[in-house]
Amino acid sequence: MSLRLTILGCHSATPRVNAFPTSQYLEINDRHFIIDCGEGTQRQMRKYKVGFSRINHIFISHLHGDHFYGLVGLLSTFGILNREKELHVFGPKGIKEATEMLLRISQSHANFELIFHELSSKKSELIFEDEKVFVHTIPLNHRVYTNGYLFKEKEKPKKLHIKNIENYPEIGKADYLNIKAGKDIVLESGEIIFNDELTIASEPPKSFAYCSDTCFLPTIIPIIKNADLLYHEATFLSDKEDLAEKTMHSTAAQAATIAKEANVKKLVLGHYSGRYDDIQLFKNEAEIIFKNTLLAEPGIIFEAY
Amino acid sequence: MSLRLTILGCHSATPRVNAFPTSQYLEINDRHFIIDCGEGTQRQMRKYKVGFSRINHIFISHLHGDHFYGLVGLLSTFGILNREKELHVFGPKGIKEATEMLLRISQSHANFELIFHELSSKKSELIFEDEKVFVHTIPLNHRVYTNGYLFKEKEKPKKLHIKNIENYPEIGKADYLNIKAGKDIVLESGEIIFNDELTIASEPPKSFAYCSDTCFLPTIIPIIKNADLLYHEATFLSDKEDLAEKTMHSTAAQAATIAKEANVKKLVLGHYSGRYDDIQLFKNEAEIIFKNTLLAEPGIIFEAY
């Protein structure tokens, strides 16, 4: 398993008992990310046993309270836990000033460096890369400046096909790095042993696209094309398409249309408006358009193999 | 019942599953107040069925996150609920700028007027008064500027003792207002009927003193003297008195000493440090000094009759 998404909260801002605003915990290729951070996120992290010390990067889509008001409490808690590792926060321009001001007024002392990466571009851009993962923004269209995020594993190194390699005593351990890097081997005889024979193909890289909040926006389709997992907001059902348009949210059918056009493998819906008592209705509506539709609920885990 | 306190959260900032930071809901003489507002307060209000529309006044003791980070989410929710009544927030200087900045950056639209009453005095002062209730500050001593609050009913009007009044046919309904106001009645004969005979004494006014966070501070005793209910923080037990002193918190024994010296009727402890698994230990320690000690827990209600 190289991609695992835990829903910490998935409701819209409408107040209800046992509704938790948006936050997700993503494990991808041994990286651990928090995506959005509504009020109460730190409590949900504890409830679902997310290791605080594993988190080094937090991605905030936009500065509406139901995606953002839990950030400062989480950062304070990192301070109380005596965190020393630096922490990176990605989010819209303005997030640094607001967060630092709140931490200052609360006199929250921290021994760790808090590094903000403020976003303002309206084009998709690479905002994070290490040896295992890329993260690109997915520009969305909501009432305030908003980005989704595309998390993608890097190509994994090929594995050695030891049994096949042993057929050629001439090939030694000194060649292994070259083989893993995809090179063919030329024997002394001049015979070429093609790399495919000496290696086992690695799993194709997995990807997760996070899209919340946004109106129906087909321009994101090329960015999220073929993603293994797509989370797309579905605040309303089609009966409220006018309200979705007015508030710049999506319906379940619109989310499913995006999923279908982008040819993703699985669609996860969330950000349900409080006006619907039965979230199953979102699944029913979306499945007509995109069969592999699932529903976010707090504590539910989605995996891509 | 004229005084009823619902504990919404009562734990210190240390992160734990199912620990809720400080917030209380006070009903006193038909007034409805929120006292402190840690992260998740609005969820606890919904859980314990606190009517959002009843709240017109919020009192914040100090700007540490575990007493304050839930305020902006609650205010946003008032906006979502289309509140129109004005809302008053009392708290330390700085609360207005921080809160307004967060609401602005989140583009939280509200139709109601939000009125901040910023406090900076180090002396006890009357900060709220209407026809039913007084609220005074209780200057506390913590790592940042902090006030407790003393909530006190006003003297209630006397009730007519109709049976006794009927012994004097001369006394008519026109006299009732004077009788309620405490006046004696002079009959035509010159006989004086003393007010005590014509009225039933009203209940003595009830009071609630809220004291969190603070080090051991005997200067508050005259302010909270004879309160019906005292909430006093007890972050530590006496085994950590040195840590209490260092962090400017109190032990259970110190809270009990304040309760005893102030001759209050009931003491409620809270703000327990996460290092103690069993909060009963706080009660055990305090009861030795002050018998009528109770423990705050989320959802628990304390009443004064």
Image (cartoon, coloured by chain):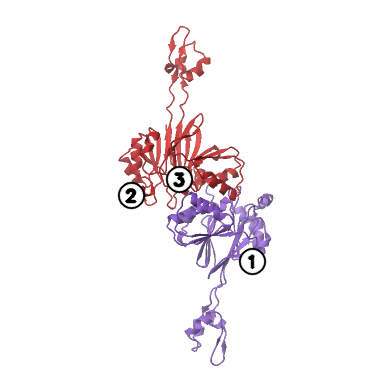
Chain colours: A purple, B red
Residue carrying label 1: A225
Q: Earlier in the sequence, mark 3 or mark 2?
A: 3
Residue B119 drawn at (x, y percent): 49, 40
Which of B218 and A194 lies nearest the eye of the viewer? B218
Name the mark nearer the viewer: 3 or 2: 2
Chain ID at mark 3: B
Marks 2 and 1: in contact by CB < 8 Å?
no
Does residue B279 lie above or below A266 as drawn? above
Does residue A130 lie above or below B78 as drawn? below
Residue carrying label 3: B22
Residue B300 drawn at (x, y percent): 43, 41
The amino acid at mark 1 is: Lys
The amino acid at mark 3 is: Thr
Q: Residues within 10 Å of mark 3 (few under 14, many from 20)?
A: many
Which of A30 and A269 lies nearest the eye of the viewer? A30
Looking at the rendering, in which quadrant would you find the C terminus of chain A?
bottom right
Query: SS of the residue at dot 2?
Result: helix
Distance, label 3 to label 2, CA atoms, is 23 Å
Residue carrying label 2: B242
Q: Residues within 10 Å of mark 2 (few under 14, many from 20)?
A: some
Marks 2 and 3: in contact by CB < 8 Å?
no
Query: SS of the residue at dot 1?
Result: loop
The amino acid at mark 2 is: Asp
Residue B38 drawn at (x, y percent): 48, 47
Please state if A283 lies on the left or on the right of B62 as rendered.
right
